[in-house]
Image: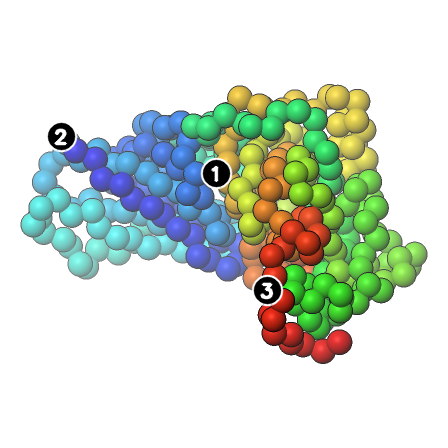
Amino acid sequence: SSYRFRFISSVDLHCPIQVSIEDHTFTVIASDGEYIEPEENVSSLTLTNGERFDILVDVSGHEERAYVIRFGGAPGEFANCKDMSAIAFLQYGHSKVDQKLEPNYSESINVPGRHINPLPTIELPSDQVPVPVSDLHSIHTLDHQGPADKTFYLQFGDGDNGANVNNILFDLKTITTPLLAQEEDQNQAALCDASYAEEGLICNPSLDKHSCACQNILNVKTGDVVEMFLINPDLEVPIAHPIHLHGYFFNVLGSGSIPAENPMAFIRQKNEEGNIERNLDNPPRKDSIQTIPGGYLLIRFYADNPGYWLMHCHISFDVIEGQVMVVKVGDRSEWDIPEDFPECGTK
């Protein structure tokens, strides 16, 4: 018989966690609550901030004893949880559990076999086989396979002023009323120039009227097919920023490498020339994903949920610093706000 487990990453630092079960392989059946074609004979998986994975563990044919469930912070110079580990127990029947057993970090990160979603910045042991998220397949077909109606080029970085998108810091202090309920009170002067995300440009503080600190809002129409290139240059501090989108699941269509110089311009040119490969054959659906330092991810969603939706790095410090965007879908007539909805904030 098999048992279903759901692992949930609720960490808030850059803390990818590797999970494995002593003397067991397992089958991964879902990510972020969305079913995938089963990935069998998996030995370990990595969860980053906000991610969830569902697995099936076949307990037939195992000796009745307690097995260690290992949790290890991914290694790597910039991972906040490296050298940290924890354990739980998979107890068969009433078998004895050794409560004095201590976690072994080396064992937790050196499990041979197939490794789902490994941190892309580390070199895996030679006996591990990486299976990135882009290699997974949804059980559902992709409904909207035509060209995108709207494309955004988003470069994630860590600058002197903090974590950013296209060198823009989202200025949270300028939002004094709820965007959804009181859009008419929004400070229009605080909005970022839309060209940075739409044309793939890096904000220059000396030229930008907001000094690159503004409300970074991406506008799409209800019914648009939206593609986003999540671009992560391999900088001096290569962080695999885990990106989360509220209000939607997105399909992961592809990934690839980028040059060190002008990566957004490179990706935009390749895309406009039709040279970006897209996996339209049941691509996986997620709402949280780790980006690839030195590479890009291509995601797509169908904008059928009107409103204002937050999109941000899931590392708490990066959110505070401004690595945040808001995706605005549709207009007020589509948001179904009660006429007597109370107002708040300062105008």
Can residue 305 be seen at all in this image of the molecule?
yes
Closest to the camera, between mark 1 and mark 3, is 3
Foreground of the two, 101 or 161: 161
Q: Which residue is mark 3?
A: 338
Quadrant hosting residue 172 = bottom right
Q: Quadrant of the C terminus?
A: bottom right
Residue 60 location (% of width, % of height): 15, 31
Q: Which mark is residue 118?
A: 1
Instruction: Give the residue drawn at x 19%, y 59%.
Output: 100
User: In the picture provided, is 47 more to the left or to the right than 347?
Assistant: left
Q: Is 128 drawn above or below residue 64 in the view shown?
A: above
Front in this rendered view, residue 25 or 196:
196
Alpha carbon distance from label 3 to label 2: 58 Å
Label 1 residue SS = loop
Q: CA distance from mark 1 to mark 3?
A: 45 Å
Q: Earlier in the sequence, mark 1 or mark 2?
A: 2
Residue 135 in view in this figure:
no
Left or right side of 205 for 108: left
Q: At label 2, which amino acid type do we have?
A: Gly
Counting from the top left corner in percent of width and height, residue 38 is at 36, 28
**Alpha carbon separation for disc pair 1 and 2:** 29 Å
User: Which residue is tagged 2?
Assistant: 61
Mark positioned earlier in the residue sequence (1 or 3)? 1
Evaluate if marks 1 and 2 touch, with contact meaning CB atoms under 8 Å apart.
no
What residue is shown at x 39% (from left), y 51% (from top)?
Answer: 8
Left or right of 188 on screen, residue 137: left
